[in-house]
Image (tube, coloured by chain):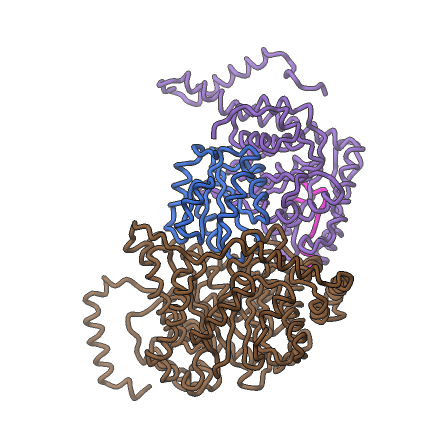
Chain colours: A blue, B purple, C brown
Amino acid sequence: MSGEHIKVLLAKKKIDVHGRGSKLIARELRDAGMEVVYFRFGVVAEIAEAALQENADVVAVSVMTSGQLQIARDLIPALKERGMTQVLVIMGGIIPEVDFEPLRALGVHRSFPPGLPGGVVAEYIRENVGKASLV
Amino acid sequence: MEAVTVPAGEVVAGSVLHAGRLITQIENGRPQARPVLRALAPYCGRAQLVGVTGPPGAGKSTLAAALIRHLRGQGRTVGVIAVDPSSPFTGGALLGDRDRMAEAAGGDPGVFIRSVASRGASGGLAAAVNDTVDVMDAMGKDVVLIETVGVGQGEFDIARIAHTVVLVLVPGYGDALQAMKAGITEIADVVAVNKGDAPGADQTAKDLAAQGFERTGPDGAERWKVPVLTVSALRGEGVAELAAAVDEHHAFTGATAWRAAAERARGRSRFTAFVADRLRGELLKAAEETLGDTRPADPYGAAEAYVGALLNAHRTLSADIPGTEQK
Amino acid sequence: MTSLTSAKFEAAKRAWAERRARYAAKLRPARTLSGLPLKTVYTPDDTTASDLAEMPGVYPFTRGLHPDGYALTPWMQQMVFGYGTIEETRRKMEKMVAEGMEGYFGHKVFNTVYDVPCMYGIDADHPEAVGNIGQCGVHMSTGDDYDELIRDWDLETTNFSMITGDNCLPALALLAAAVERRGEPVGKMHGNSMNWYPRIAVQDVPSWEPRWGYALMIDLIRWARANAPDWNPANIFMYGLSEAGATPVQELAYGLAWGKSIIDAGLAAGLEPDDFIGRLSFQIGCTVNVFEEVAKFRAHRRMWARLCKDAGVTKPSGMFARVHVHTSGYVLTQQQLMNNNARITLQTLAAVLGGVQSIHTCSYDEAVGVPTEQSHRTALRTQQILMWESGLRDVADPLGGSYFIEKLTDEMEAAAWEIFDEIEASGGYLRGIETGEVKRNIDNSSYEMKKMINSGDLPIVGVNRYVSQEQENYEPFRIDETIEVKARARLEAYRAKRDQAAVDAAIEDVRRACQNLKDGTGPLMPALVDAARKGVTNGEMMVPMREAFGWYVSE
């Protein structure tokens, strides 16, 4: 096997009809050399379980129809419970800037607005992967 | 991405956290994984290994999802190794198989899905898949499904890790179908013509069945008649029959000389793959270091002499390779 | 054209070519969003005789559906809304009416979006509904909810468009049962079922297996035809295609292929062309690319008219492409939020110049979340300013006869027919869902466009041009999260007062009717309406439906 690759679990809510942004970011991260597991979840525990099985370095959640705070409230403890304390957790999508700080307080390392020029998310991941901890 | 040694006992006890980490070390060729894999060896050999291969777009993941649902219905636990291609340009990969299987597996602790990127070299991939199979086997999964990318001869190596190889085809592939016919006689134990709703599926299945494919096993063993089934993974039709055919093949090989021969072949290929990997990685590196800054005037001759010396050294080793069973 | 191609014109062209040659090397060749090459100027040489032989209100309707354009029938202002439980949404409905939102003849038009749990078909107590109840649409699941919805409506003058997902049939059944409870005939209902199952071609949500998705669409169309003849039973959701990344030409091509697939399915089910085709309508997206969008709407009308005629429709009004425009939300940026008002104005301008029948204007803050009251009103006012201040309504098809617009209309039509023919040749739109062909092609366009934005080839102000580092900290509209508690309480109270035995029996009837629909031996809608009468909820109806027709795939 050649080289080590950053593994990203990219999760999007199953019942959410919007998918353009999550698919675009999946392709961008792939083109940045990462291994991206695209995954639609029903309940938040499924994200944590998938992250565990995949031993993901990064859990990225795409949110288009609200509920970001609730997802964070459920996701961070679910990851910690399973011993995934080193994983980098990011969110993106239709999330207002004013939620970024509350999300950070809940344990989400970084949130991104929609429509960012390419490369921003990949760069952030590359710089921060392996350094994060969930406390 | 530090790599600590994973406790083997945790893996055997079914810890997904530790198994997940160990598989990452395997994928990355980390030496820490080696002693753990050796410690897992006594717990391996119980799982039924099923390969799912076929051309891209044949519906392998959807069929695998249907199989998972069926197996879970029978109360069997399932491990899945789903291989997707890496981009040759960026090295990145989009791994979508988990998503296609999620509906079958979502939140079920009896299913462990691991997405694996092919990362170019299929030889290395085969070794990693072999080791990953061991991890899931040691965890106690009843069945391990290996879903391949579906392109290239290297795919066949990966599919052949399994006890039973299911070749998934779609009707109307034309030339591709002709090409796959060669593959059928080579590797397929069971053929599934997928998308039973598409026009021509029944005809394709009939045409294939009429060929009467047989696989020849080890000397003196009974031949295996390759069954050709029609399935619709999307509609869940024909899945029970497919699962039954897979089990029947598994029982057949277990009751004949097939299984032992296959296990021996698998063991030998793992040995050579592992040795090749270390020789390439470590012996060559040592040789290069010995060369230092010097430049051999006759590179070809120097290489010949070096390999000759190595072979001599090998002959002085004991006739048996330690840790292997006698034939 | 011969009169125009006079010696004087030829001389002008020569002089133009000479002047242009001096700086031709500096000109960057322009393209439309769909990739069609543009010239720097268009002349009579670009028009064809057929471009000049058309009038508004006459087949093939390139220049509009009505002879007088908007003079007598201005476009309908159909703002999409819906949030919280029915109480919050009712309040919003009344507010919008007070703000002057109206349809034809002053009728009330409520273009109401359901929340994603309802669309998917799960009730408020389902674990997967957490975080999404009443958030981006109204949560309506019980008979009580629908009774409250229509409480004081005049059914003759109230038009209700239900933006549903897979719950399309259950929602209509619940509405019909509520109308019955008021003692009025179901035939008085006015409005629209979206019935846009084929959106699954581009959307990553679990839905129905394609053949059953189509069977369900036709089942609703049949039921409406027999029971509620004024009800519009199906819409073609081209907006979903363009928001997923389709270029305007792809949106046209796949949208028409979608329409054709409904026509084919209806005819195969034994419906007559004049029975149902004229009741189909469209929802189309609109970007800020003004001329391309105008040309798209013009080409769309005549392409649809031709498809209808070929299918055997005889009444000219049955060939109308009745279009509701939803201004593209994808073009809105979270960066420098107020800039979106300029975009929305341009989008609305393009839709009006394109001659569409109904418009929803996005609010400038939809890039951040659900619109506030203030931003939603501004969006409505944008339409009203165009309607009353701009003079845009006075002349039908004011761009008709423009060398450029006529040429672009022709070129978009030709490019769209090419893709249309391709998908028809490979088995049609339904097959394109199964093979993932539609999704693949549209996803690729989406990625190409993103790469052009990343490289700056496609300028977006505030994103890759004139970027500002300032934080905006815009506070969007918040839907109280306690709405979930309220919705669950309503559901529980509703369930407690039902005759549970009757409910269970009705669900069993639905299960049997699902099997009948699969076997081709009977309809499903009547069993759903009966279940609604007995108190079965949206989510409960969907359980046997998902068992019978469910499908989950992504290519």
Image side of residue B221 versus residue C63, left or right: right
* Residue B259 falls in image quadrant: top right
Residue C403 magenta: no
In-front residue for pair C432/A41: A41
Q: Is residue A67 visible?
A: yes
* Residue C526 falls in image quadrant: bottom right
Q: Position of residue A104 (x, y in %)?
A: 43, 42
Q: Is residue C54 visible?
A: no
Q: Position of residue A111 (x, y in %)?
A: 42, 46
Q: Position of residue B270 (x, y in %)?
A: 62, 27
In-front residue for pair B2/B231: B2
Residue B193 magenta: yes
The span picked out in magenta is B183-201
In-front residue for pair C345/B261: C345
Q: Is residue B38 above or below residue B84?
A: above
Instruction: Name the residue located 59 percent from the left edge and 73 percent from the top edge.
Output: C151
Q: Is residue C410 above or below residue B297?
A: below
Image side of residue C94 versus residue C342, left or right: right
In-front residue for pair C151/B327: C151
Q: Position of residue B35 (x, y in %)?
A: 58, 21
Count numbered badges in the picture. 0
